[in-house]
Image (tube, rainbow, N blue to C red):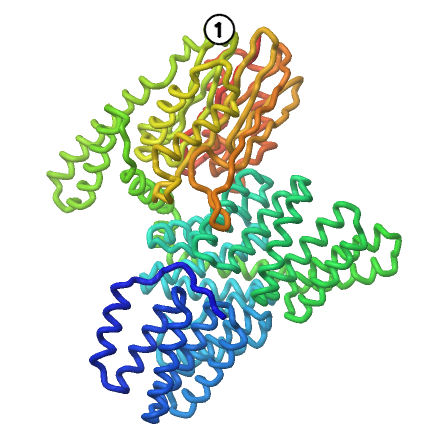
Amino acid sequence: MFSSATCLAQPSKIDSLESELKKAIDTSKVNVLIALAWEYRKIDLEKALRYSSLGLAISEKNDFKKGKGNTYSKLGDVYYSVCEYGKALEFYSKSLKIQESIDDIKGEANCLNSIGNVNVIQGDYEKGLNNYLKSLEIYESIGDKKAMPFNNIAASYYYLGNYEKALEYYIKALKIFDNLGNKKLMINPALGVANVYVVLGNYKSALAYYKQALAMSIELGNKSGLSVSLNGIGIVYENLHNNDTALVYYLRSLQINEETENKSSIANSLMNIGNVYSTAKNYKRALKYYHKALYINEKTENKNQTSKTLLNIGILYSQQKEVEKALEYFKKGLVLANSIKSNEIIMHCNENISEVYEKKGDYEQAYYYHKLYSDVKDSLLNERSGKQIAEMNTKYESEKKAKDILLLTKDKDLQQAEIAKQKLLRNGTIGGLVCALSLAFILFNRFRVTSKQKTIIESQKFQIVESINYSKKIQDSLLPNIEGMRKAIPNLFVFYEPKDIVSGDFYYFCEFEKYTLLACVDCTGHGVPGGFMSTLGCLLLDKIANSETLSPSDILNKLSDEIIRVLHQQDGGEIQDGMDLSICLIDRKKGKIDFSGARNGIILVSADKAKRYKADPLPVGGNYVKKGKALERSFKTQSISIDTNDWIYMYTDGFMEQVGGEDGVPMNYTQFENQLIGLSKIQSPGEKNIMLQTIHDKWRGTHERDDDILILGFQVV
């Protein structure tokens, strides 16, 4: 019994094919039936199988071997798409025999590639690699560059732990698809290169390739590429110990995977989210995510991911000193990893088993498994491979420097364009700024369309700048006056640096009889798109924060409800953006603050030490769904006692996530906190702003500005 998935095909295409089917003669009908089976594979499996069977029956009746071979291949595709890998392999093999008998070498190459896909997903990487290489040989003989399975070959080498070969074939794929100008085909090898760099610890390069894939995925509306890119960026941030940011990317990736019902990717996102909670020592929640991932991986027979999940569960039990349970999962993972010859997982399983035996005092077993770990490690990451990998990538970069640099630097523009396109759909009623920004964006689009007409370009460019400059005046008028804020909080400074003329960051201030309310807000996007959202947020906050009896968490809950209502997000609307923010309700007499945050925390600096108060993981706004049900948000308030000399810092992510430094990566929290500790020794607001600007410029170096920047600091006197 097969269940139907969500409709993803285009009804107009199905109608056209069914109309064509009525007119076709028997042999022509086969191709139409195959096409219909493909369109129905994700919306009605019964129909997909029925159309395939009809195609097979017609082929057998007319002794139409090519049609029979193609129908078997399509049946394999249908079963593969619903994770029935055993049946998929059966039909691919039948198709291969027929293609070989009629000398259809292209059909033969397609079948070998498809069989390789099944081999890999079942964990038999060597067999999969062998089939991919046979397929490649055929494609090379007929000069079909587009179909060459370089990406699949690279993935096989990656799973086998041969990173040198993996990178070689990923780069071959990138080079060919780049020369063909096919961005759709470039996405997977770009992600593959990034994955290799993560394993090698080169996070700067990994992030660059993930962002390249992300930009292309956004441009092409490729949800699969978008999900994998977001997940990869999360992995980079997790490795850089920026777990809050990593969790944001993992949750975004999970949401997309659940929308597309991609079981394997759902499991991957669940495991990565579990990793974040494990790092935070929230073992109960981590274990919950791991077991969900394990269930899906076992169900889909994904041996590679199953072994990884078993390894992670073992690590979690080991951290809790439950050594017997840890050993049980490590050894299960090791058996599975050995069966698929995944050297990377074998290495980590042996390492962790050795550590567990050492904790138990069984040094003989500890030494035995440590030796196994060392042997595999040496074979994976030797000095020669590292040098060859570096040389190979340098050669590739030099050959396509101009075009590649364009791709790598274009990602922010592509993302901004996509966000801007979505924001224009918003039903805004926000007065003059909306009108001005709408005019600016319309003019910008017209500017692009008429780029060949120089006179019009210059005229429209002037109008765009004038419109956005006027928008800035409106946006600035909505921000509270800093001198007025200092009457309530004398020792306060604001470092506010928009990336573009208008900003997606803003700050909010409200004075009550006994309390002072401060908010530091980061809206999705910057520039024109961020300007829309920040104006909406400012006006909604002004509407909501009208009573000192409201706690910061009450304000966040109400703000989230209002954004969802105004943007119709509860109905699954296209605009699902929100805001990350921190709110502090300051009680000056009692020397305390009540804090609540949505993704954005605050930092307390006291006696040259920094303490970070974390926020809740979801933003305000946005319809976050899990298994078809909206996730409930209930923000929490934390009460913090403050001494006279303590400094509280509220911030958005623009300063800390700026790419720069010696390694060309964002700051981590420790680096950011150290800068704030130094900043706390300076009292003058002007000097604080100069110091922050100097630090940021030095860190950024020659890199482009990434985002808007907002940092607020104050003392409770």
Where does residue 102 sit, x and y in percent of width and height? 38, 91
Residue at 56%, 56% in the rendered image: 267
Name the side, left or right, on which 340 lies relative to 100: right
Residue at 42%, 70% in the rendered image: 45
Name the side, left or right, on which 451 lies relative to 488: left
Residue at 54%, 11% in the rendered image: 683
Image vertical order of residue 621 relative to residue 497, above or below? below
Where does residue 589 sit, x and y in percent of width and height? 58, 6
Image vertical order of residue 155 relative to residue 361, above or below? below
* Residue picked out by circle 1: 513
Image quarter (top left, top right, bottom left or bottom right) of the C terminus: top right
Q: Secondary structure at mark 1?
A: loop
Q: Residues within 10 Å of mark 1 (few under 14, many from 20)?
A: few
Foreground of the two, 567 or 131:
567
Q: Is there any visible trace of residue 209 in the rendered image?
A: no
Q: Is there any visible trace of residue 248 in the rendered image?
A: yes
Residue at 34%, 28% in the rendered image: 536
Amino acid type for the residue under numbered disc 1? Glu
Where does residue 497 sit, x and y in percent of width and height? 40, 25
Where does residue 371 sit, x and y in percent of width and height? 78, 62
Foreground of the two, 138 or 615:
615
Name the side, left or right, on which 124 lies relative to 450: right
